[in-house]
Structures are given as structure tokens and as C-alpha cells.
Amino acid sequence: MVSGRTGLLLIVEKQPTGNTLTLTHDVEKALAALRPGLRDVEIDPAIFRPATFIEQSMRNLRAALGLGCVLVIAVLSLFLRDLRSAAISLTAIPLSLVGALLVLSLAGGTLNTMFLAGLVIATGEVVDDAIIDVENIRRRLRAQPTHDARTALQTVLAASLEVRSSVVYASLLVCLVFLPVLVLDGVAGAFFRPLALAYVLSILTSLLVALTVTPALSLLLLPRAPQGLTDAQRPLLTWLHTRYRRLLQPLVARPRLAVIATAATAVLGIAVVPWLGDEFLPDFQERDFLMHWIEKPGASVEASRRSTLRVSQELLSIPGVRSFGSHIGRAEVADEVVGPNFTEHWISLDPDVDYARTLARIRDVVAGYPGVFHDVLTYLKERMKDVLSGAQGAIVVRIFGSDFSTLRSQAEEISARMGRIAGVVDLKVEPQVLVPQIEVRVRPERAALHGLSAAQIRRMASTLIAGTKVGEVVHAPLQMDVVVWGVPGVRDDLTALRRLLIETPTGAQIPLSDVADVSIVAAPSEIKREGGSRRIDVMCNVRGRDHGEVAREVEALLRAHPFPRGYHPELLGEFAARQRARNQLMLWSLIAALGCLLLLYWDFRSVRLTILIVATLPFALTGGVVGALAGGGVLSLGSLVGFVSVLGIASRNALMLLGHYRHLREHEGLLHDDALALRGAEERLVPILMTALCAALSLLPIVVRGRLPGYEIEHPMALVILCGLLTSTVLNLLLLPALYRGYGRTR
């Protein structure tokens, strides 16, 4: 049925290796070529078109990438005030992003929304290494102005080598932090691995650019160029340095105050975390919806057609609903074999309609059909739920046991108790009805007297009642099964079944009633098994409350419920998938953290300095928590990945600052005193601010525009990174010099 009229639905499914956009465009080209020969046929290629969401998401992400690049250019221009230096630093952006895309292409991958999102997040960070290198080279050239080529080469080389170790280790540290995201599996891995891959490839490419292209361009463009204004001649930088020194001096003199502030920051961040809600993945802003419409088992095609026609008329009357399509049942050879009581509706919205309001009206309409299991899902949500549990519910309680009636009663009891939990909607027990079936119950003692086993009796009875395939007849192109079974008079008459003659091992024939009780009993229309055990599902969605909070209440309910011996529940769905993904992230984060500690120790060869860098991580954690609160107080997988990202960035900034302190001590002979702490911090102030602002402003388009199509996962992630970056930058600049002064002496 198409938009309330009888029609023909052509369903096109892509192979796992296919590209949705390419396939969609090819199908549309084929339909356009067919139109001249189908003049009396109305063709609508957009009844259900997932490519629309992908196209819109790609446009939004490209816009965010472009705007982020513009903001990065603005930051570099503001701070550097030199066209040549800005151009050298900006070269890292196209080279890094193109390098990541080149590796993707060589690996046989395709550009998708999550890979593009990874490039967006990395945009502001790929210039970090180049900024640090260029800024240090500029500073050295101002201190040692020369027009001699050999001297210029030595100065540029020395300046580049000065920061090389910190740049390399900082980039490797950021990549190592993303290891937990790269190894995620399941649905979480499918979503986030492309993002992490894009980010890591961009960072590694930017490192290569900073080690090769940036020094070469600096040598070519900077020595003979006017050095421009000094920091003292630039009002903004003069003001920053003056204010920064005034703030820093009393803190450097009181290292214990910095320790207290660091501890308080850590406690504050950790204390707020339990108040945050849980979410697996957000709702995607797709304009195409799938609605499963399941009536009681045994419902006829005509009954399903009547209800489908009525609901289609009501839905099409809603302003903003563009089209409606549906099909009833499935063919026996389809990917999903269901009965005539199963209908799938496809609803498409106009692109400029009020999304939330229209969706609410659709849900109000379908809620007016009691006794019918229904849900309204986007395509991604529907696919995700199928993969997670095979059931249509955000929370699925799957109960296992041997007896159907006991399973049913337990499911009904659990459903009644779940219905009292606030936020639970669309609560359903897996629909099943009892239908009459023939039961042959073998009497073992009577069967033994005739030398028959229970299996032999059931097999012979089954052959006569239900039929047994014994061969095939092939008559090209047809292939027909050969089935042996009893005549209709035997199959349809219970008395005749009891008199059914079966053969004993001696060749004698006896009535079936001599060795078995034959009766008609009520049996479920469908029995589902998993792992050799019968099971039944209790399903629900969540609305108006935090998903994780509701799931935890359901989990507590299951723990408290006294299930009979041999029966047990499993909690499935989005909550279970999130718990699994979170546990994976935690485990691999511990491994990555150990790797980061070893990497930091390998660089500094000092336990003290390694601990100092670790001590700065709460600075980012607290800001990330603030970002999560600003995003609705919910920790989704996107938010967790954001925490991973910002912890890596925070560690990078701390490493760069401590690396500069090391250079001042080992190569310029400064003593470990207040003057060292102040000078090192002042010299790193501008590079740290530039790198932080570039990273922050590249995310600003996603943060400001909210959860547009393509931003659903990235928006909470960007909020966490942005807020964590701001707090970590400020606190690193203020507290880390004091911590280094008080506790960073290595010898």
C-alpha cells in the first residue's frame, strides 16, 4: 500500500560492501531512464530514502569543517600577525586531512559521516605541532637575527630540534589515548572506529608535516623576512603576558596552594559524575521512519489491510507527513519471515517540517490503536535494535526456561512490575496466542512391549500427520519435493489418528492408541529458542526519563524477583550494549593509560614529571563534566569518547610545557627556581593559547548549531572536548608552573 492506495513497492537492499549514496543515485538514474516507458505509472523514489539523511549529514559536517578552518585561520592571524608564519602553520591542515583521506582510499575504505566527523574534530589539532614549531623558530630568529644562509639553517634546525621530542611524544600520546576507541567492537565499534581512525591518521600526518614540511618552509620563508612585531609591540600579547605574570607569581610562590586546587578540582569532577544520566546513542534526526505494526498472531491479511488503510489516512492528514508506504507479511524466502499479522510502515517527512512536533503527533496517532504492538523508529535505530537484541525495544528483558506456561506467567508478572516504573512506554510482552495442535504422548512401558522407542513412534506419526520429505523431482527449471504423508481423512479426524496403524520391528501393525495418547491441546503459535532453551521477551521504550536510570531500576527489579528454579532473565537492548561498550572502554583505557605512563617516563626519565602530567588530568575531567551537564546531563558513548579525546589533548599541553622547562634547564643552564617557572610558562603561553583556541574554535560550529543531522553524536562529544579544553588550558597555565616549581626538581 502506497500513501493510502494500492501500489507496488520495490524494496532495494544493498550488499554489506555497497555504498548507500552510490547505490541510491544509480537506482534513481535507472528509474529516470524507465519513466518514458511508464507514462501511466506514478513513481515515487523517496518513500523511504536513507540516503537523504546521509546527504544532509555530510553537508552539515562539511560546513562545520569549512567554518572550523576559517576560525583557525582567524586565530593564527590574530596571534601571529605575520602572513608567512600563518601560511606555514595553515599548511598542516590540508596536508593532514588529505593524508588521512589518502590512507583511507589506499585501504579501500569509503568516506562516511563518522570519518568526516573525525576530520572535523582533528581540524583544530593538526596545526598544533606546526604552531609550536613555527613559534619556536620565530622566537629563535628574533633572538639571533641573521641573513647568512648557513647561520639561518643552524638556527632553524636547532629551534626545530628543541621541540622535536615534545612534539613527537605529544602526538604519540594523543594517538595512544584513542586506542580504546579503535578496538571497540559491536555497534559501538561500527559507529566510533571510523571517527577514531580519521582522528589518529590526521594527527600522525600532521606530525609528519611538522617534522618535515614545517621546518623546510620556515627555512625558506622566515629568515629573510621582516620579523614583524615583537610580543612587546603587540598590544594583545603584551596585555596577556602582563596579566599572566601577575596571576602566576603568587601561585609559583605557593606550590601547596596549587596542590589543594588540583585536589579540589579532581574531587569536584568525580563528585558530579554519578549525577549524570546514561545513554547509548542519541536519537538521529532522520526524516524517514519505520513503524512495526504487529497484530495478534492469527490475524488475517484482510484485517491487517483494514487497520493499515485506516492508520495511513490518519498519518497522511498530519501536516509535514510527505508519504506513507507499507507492506504486510513477508515472502517465505525473505530476510525476515513473518506472518500476515506483521506489517511494516514507512513514513517520510518534509525536510523543513518541525521535527519534534510532527514526531509527537505521529506517536499520538499510533497510540490510539490498543492491542497492536507498534513502535516508531528511525532507520538507524531500527537496525541498531535488531542487531542488539533482535527485539523492538530500547530495553528488552529476555526470560529463559523450559515450560511455556511458566515463561508466559513470569513475563506477565515482570511486565506488570515494569509498568510501574516511571518513564516506561510501549510496554509489551512478546505476542503469542494458543492454537490447537495434535499432541502424541508416548507411553514408554507400552511401547517397550512392542519393541518400539518413543523416537520411532513420533517419527512414524509425524510422517503420516505432517509429512516427510523423501526426495526431489527436477524438471528444469522447476524443482519439486517428494513428500510422503497420510491421506486427508486420517489427518483431519482424531479418532482416525488414534486408529492409525504403525509397524513394529516384527512386521506387525498396531494402532497408535496402543502405545500413545493422542489428543488436541492448546499450544503457542510460535516457540522461540536460544541456546537450546525456550525464551520470551518483555520489551519497552523509555520516554521522559534518563534511559540508564530506568534500565537500572529494571535491573534491580529482576534481581529482586524470585524466578523459579531453571528460569533466569537477561537484560538486553541499548543499556546492555552501553554497559558492554563502557566496560571495554574502561579496560582498554587502563591499558592505554599504562602505555601513556611508560611513554611519558621514556621521554622525561623522571617519575616526578610523569606524575605531574597525570595530576593535570582532573583539569580536563572537570571541564568535560561541565560540558556533559550543558549537553543535557547525559553521558552517551559520544560523551565518553569526548572524555578520551580531551584527556589526550590536556596531556599534550602539559607535556609541551614541561618539555620546555627541561630544555631551559638542560640546554640554557637555568636553575630550578621561581624565575625558571615564570619564564618557561611565559614563553609557552602564546603557543598553548593558540593550540587550545584552534582546537576549541574548530568545534564551535558543532556546539553552536546543536544536534542537526550529522551532529547527533558529535554535539555531546564536542561539548565535552570544548569545556574540558578550556578548563585544562586555564588550569594548566596557572597551576602546572607552581606544581613544577614545588615538586618538579629532578636533580
Image: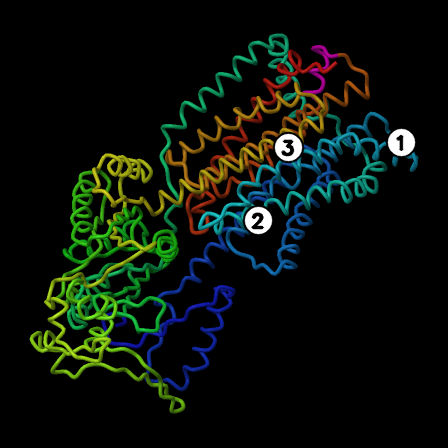
Sequence-wise, the earlier of marks 1 and 2 is 2
Q: Is residue 742 above or below residue 225?
A: above
Residue at screen point 67% across, 22% down: 238
- Within 10 Å of disc 3 (Cα), the crowding (few <14, some 14-19, many 20+) is many
Q: Nearer the viewer, mark 3 or mark 1?
A: 3
Q: Quadrant of the N terminus?
A: bottom left
- Within 10 Å of disc 1 (Cα), the crowding (few <14, some 14-19, many 20+) is some
Sequence-wise, the earlier of marks 3 and 2 is 2
Left or right side of 570 for 458: left
Q: Is residue 168 above or below residue 535?
A: above
Does the segment drawn in magenta span residue 120?
no
State the extent of the magenta-drawn residues as a range: 672-682
In percent of width and height, residue 314 lies at 19, 62
Left or right side of 87 for 401: left
Q: Quadrant of the C terminus?
A: top right
According to the image, label 3 marks what residue?
Answer: 690
Q: Which mark is residue 146?
A: 1
Mark 2: amino acid: Gly
Do the CB atoms of the residues marked 3 and 2 lie less than 8 Å apart? no
Mark 3: amino acid: Met
Mark 1: amino acid: Thr
Of 196 and 123, the residue lying toward us? 196
The quarter of the displayed image where residue 170 is located: top right
The quarter of the displayed image where residue 482 is located: bottom left
Q: Which mark is residue 66?
A: 2
